[in-house]
Amino acid sequence: MEIDCKVLFVSPEAVPFAKTGGLADVSGSLPKYLKKLGCDVRIVLPFYRMVRELRLPYETIVKVLEVPSKDGILKAEINQVLLDGNVPVYFITYDTFYDRESLYGTSKGDYHDNAERFIFFCRAVLELCLRVNFQPDIIHCNEWQTGLVPAYLKTLYKNDQFFSQTATVYTIHNIAYQGIFEKETFEKTCLPEGVFCDTGIEYYGKINFMKAGIIYSDIINTVSRKYSEEIQTEEYGCGLQNIMKERADILFSVINGVNYNEWNPETDTFITANYNRNNTSGKMLCKQDLLLQFKLPLSLMERPLFGIISRLAEQKGIDLLGETIDRLMAFNVGFVLLGVGEERYQRLFQNFAYRYPERIGVRIAYDNPLAHKIEAGVDIFLMPSRFEPCGLNQIYSLRYGSIPIVRATGGLDDTVKDYEQENGAGNGFKFTEYKTSAFLEKMKEALDIFTNKEVWSQLMQKAMSEDFSWEISAKKYLELYKKAQSRLRLR
Ligand code: ADP
């Protein structure tokens, strides 16, 4: 593939515009690195209310984009802004669908018309290409919200010469969210009738956007090697395991990179003292600052401090964590939690903070500066996830010398190597069984090593030397693009 490969990166969210999770971090970073590698990369996003409210210097480049729908032509507008001054971001503007309080729903549930909102988005993406005359070599789609783009390309736009050289790559960031809608929705997609079948978009009598992405793309990938294996099993495949198995020949994995400009204790502006692997003395000041933030006594400076930053969802192993807290407290350690999510978990941890006011700090909030302070201030970072496609916090923790204890699933398994006492190999602690006993055992092992300052410091050195930069992962995506193009030529 020519290095001047034209890539259209399609995502429902991207930093710094709109974010609900790790997908936004990826979508805001990867395109910048593809650009550095020489790609002509452009991003497409919906123009949500929160994007408008950023009041960036948006330029209306298309006043009327005609988007076919079941109800006739709908008229969208295209606004554009440059990311980092050189990556164009196209915003599909259609207020009926996107001028809302949040991205996909409120605490009361998902928006009732999410199917229509993303049917429209997918169709608009292709119409946009035609309109601005951007002929992509690759359309890179992400998550269920973009799953219909490859389906349209292989059906309604199949004979359009404009797209004859366009291949698709589809990235699954989390197979637990598939975009499943009632059969009646199918009509609204305007896809040919034959597509509503077992080998198409149909899924147990309903329609499934992610399945469409998987079936109609030239190449599929997930965000860690382990997760690409897991989603072919009943336990993790969320119903799509057989389709994943059938498509295993085109299923790849690329671990997410992290943005070390933002997450680096050497330059982090949110933390009280900077430090690096050659001089970690600043980390103690960060720990002190963190204790103050949570109004915990400074006597905890002498004791190991555990922490977690997480969506409070079942996926993240919050129930397992809850089951260990009393036992963990018996070791006379400190613990801090930052997170929002399910009510029952919020209450559970607020209750722990109430019961152990001298040792547990809990903040139910979404707070980025505090997330940085926790990464820097804790000694041990916990991620006992039930499943974790990639996970970012454990990777940040490694760089901040906050030793992760993780469950061996998905990206956690790929990025954390269990510590081996005999030879000092490893960069953290890892348990396999989703059981309190397995988790506690690793905590005990970590506490034991922590008491030996010299060994702990060596472990920190190793963790801080790990490198998960985007430079490496972006090159892997280029290889996937190359594969997608050669499959297109075979067709
Ligand atoms: P997921 O995308 O499944 O939520 P990841 O570990 O891939 O999990 O990414 C989570 C991202 O969101 C990280 O950047 C993390 O720091 C951030 N994050 C999660 N919860 C909070 C919170 N309560 N406050 C601040 N940042 C948070």
Image: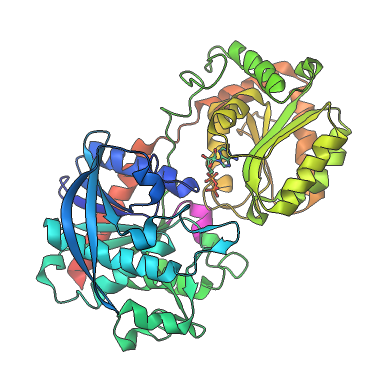
- Depth check: give the residue in front, 466 or 54: 54
Horizontal arrangement in the rendering, residue 107 relative to residue 288 (left or right): left
Q: Can the viewer see residue 147?
A: no
What residue is drawn where x is 59% and y is 64%?
A: 236
**Total of numbered circles in the picture?**
0
- Depth check: give the residue in front, 107 or 88: 107
In the rendered image, which quarter is residue 58 located in? top left
Quarter of the figure with the C terminus = bottom left
Judged from the image, the quadrant occupied by ligand 1 is top right
Horizontal arrangement in the rendering, residue 161 relative to residue 460 (left or right): left
Residue 84, x across and y down, in percent: 27, 33
What residue is drawn where x is 57% and y is 22%?
A: 461
Residue 80, x across and y down, in percent: 23, 46
What residue is drawn where x is 61% and y is 52%?
A: 409
Horizontal arrangement in the rendering, residue 144 relative to residue 204 (left or right): left
Horizontal arrangement in the rendering, residue 4 relative to residue 430 (left or right): left
Compared to 127, does 140 lie above or below? Answer: above
> What's the colour scheme?
rainbow
Write the start and end of the magenta stretch as one range: 222-228
Q: Can the viewer see residue 266?
A: yes
Judge whether residue 403 is colored magenta: no
Compared to 422, does 147 lie above or below? Answer: below
Compared to 236, does 472 lie above or below? Answer: above
Residue 201, x across and y down, in percent: 40, 79
What residue is drawn where x is 71% and y is 21%?
A: 291
Judge whether residue 223 is colored magenta: yes
Residue 279, x across and y down, in percent: 55, 11
